[in-house]
Every structure is written in C-alpha cells, then in structure tokens.
Amino acid sequence: MKAAVIVFPGSNCDRDVQVSLRQSIGNEPVMVWHKDRDFEKVDLIVLPGGFSYGDYLRCGAIAANSPVMKEVVGRAGKGVAVLGICNGFQMLTETGLVPGTLMRNANLRYICRDVDIKVETSQSLFTAKYEQDQSIRIPIAHHDGNYFADDDTLSAMEDRGQIAFRYCEPDGKVTARANPNGSQRNIAGVFNETKTVLGLMPHPERLADPKLGGNDGRPFFDGLVEALS
C-alpha cells in the first residue's frame, strides 16, 4: 500500500499522520507539497489537520483551491480513498467531496481535549478494525468543528449510512452533553456516498501509540492498510 500526505502552508499535523501511516504501512508515505499539480499513484490520500493558509477567508477554503486539490478531487472521483482530518475535513466540505459544512464551535472557543466518539459503522475502509457502536477516545483540536447540514440532507445521509462517527459518552450513549462543538446530531465524521472519502474532526493520529497516552487511533490506520493492500 502507498499513501500520500498533502502538505499546505500552515499544516501542523502532516508529520503526525506521516508517523502513524509509517507505523501501520511499514514504508514511508509520500509528502506532497500543495503547489504540486501531480504526484505518483497512491492508494490513499490524506489531507491533514492544521491551519492551512492561516485559516484566512474560511477554514479550508483557500486550500480547497490550491493547485494540488484538482488532482485530489479527480482521483477521489475515480475511487481513490481520501481522508480529511480536522482542517482536511474542512477542505473536503469546501470541495464538495463530502456534504455539509463546518462552522464556528457553538461556544465560539477553540477546543483541545480528548473526546469519546461512537463508531457508527464498521463497514468501510476507514472503520473496518472497529466494532459498530464501539466507543473510542480520540483528541479534538479545533475552533470550527461545528458540523452543519440541513435536516433533509442529514436524514438522507443517515439513510445511506454516511455518518461515520458521533460524539458520545464513554459508554457510547449519544447525548447533548457529549457534544463538544454543537455539531448537528452529534456528528464527528462523515463519508461520501461510496464511503471512499471520509472527513472527521477528531485526530486518530494523535492517539495511535501508547507513548502518546492511548492507541484507540491505531486500528484506524491498521484497518486502512488491510483494506487497501
């Protein structure tokens, strides 16, 4: 399996993802600069977290129009797996690769802490190593993670199984108290219709090694390797 991590000015989680992918794959992912209009064939493309272009204009909006993204969108259209984490999730919504949008957190504050999220399905490239309804602990670090889509869109997404993760209590119960940012229906991550593209606000790469305080994120990357190898 080969993976590429797209690097933007202002990315700050590209190296974290690089390390997690290296651990799971056993080889070095390709690091692709945002101005590169083409790159070698890979099985997985990752848009990492951070503050691309300083988050000027709207989070992810400038990055979504960078030279490399035309290639990313084109490959996604051909079925190549694409993962967007935090700022990368914002880019996915800006390009239309996943539905919805990400707004300011409901409390208008930056939030950086571990949260519990519920795995809504194990039937995807990204969640195959988890059990459906499993609760895992993963960090968040964002100011604009409040997921929004209109009710009709959300209901259609739920019917198609496009909800990947929801914020929950440690026992897996989905409650308003467990929602850190005001996201509609406690949504923490969503798929495209074919489940080959995933955007999520929590950072699995930040808890993918016991040395980091936990490894609930490690099955995320191990599962991708098994599915795409």
Image (spheres, rainbow, N blue to C red):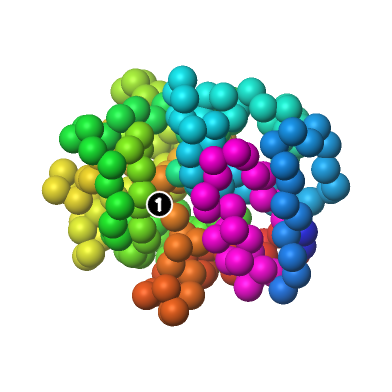
Q: Quadrant of the C terminus?
A: bottom right
In the displayed structure, would residue 13 be above or below residue 184? below
In the displayed structure, would residue 12 be above or below residue 105? below
34 vs 141, left or right, is: right
In what element is the residue under mark 1? loop
Where residue 100 sits, quadrant-wise, is top left
Seen at 72% across and 73% down, the residue is 26
178 vs 150, left or right, is: left
Seen at 28% across and 42% down, the residue is 110
Seen at 22% across and 65% down, the residue is 171
Q: Is residue 122 magenta?
A: no
Say which residue label 1 marks. Answer: 202
Q: Is residue 10 magenta?
A: yes
Q: Which residues are magenta?
A: 3-25
220 vs 105, left or right, is: right
Relative image position of residue 180 (x, y in whole percent): 23, 45
Relative image position of residue 196 (x, y in whole percent): 62, 44
Residue most toward the bottom? 210
The amino acid type, in three-letter code, at marker 1 is: Pro
Where residue 68 sits, quadrant-wise, is top right
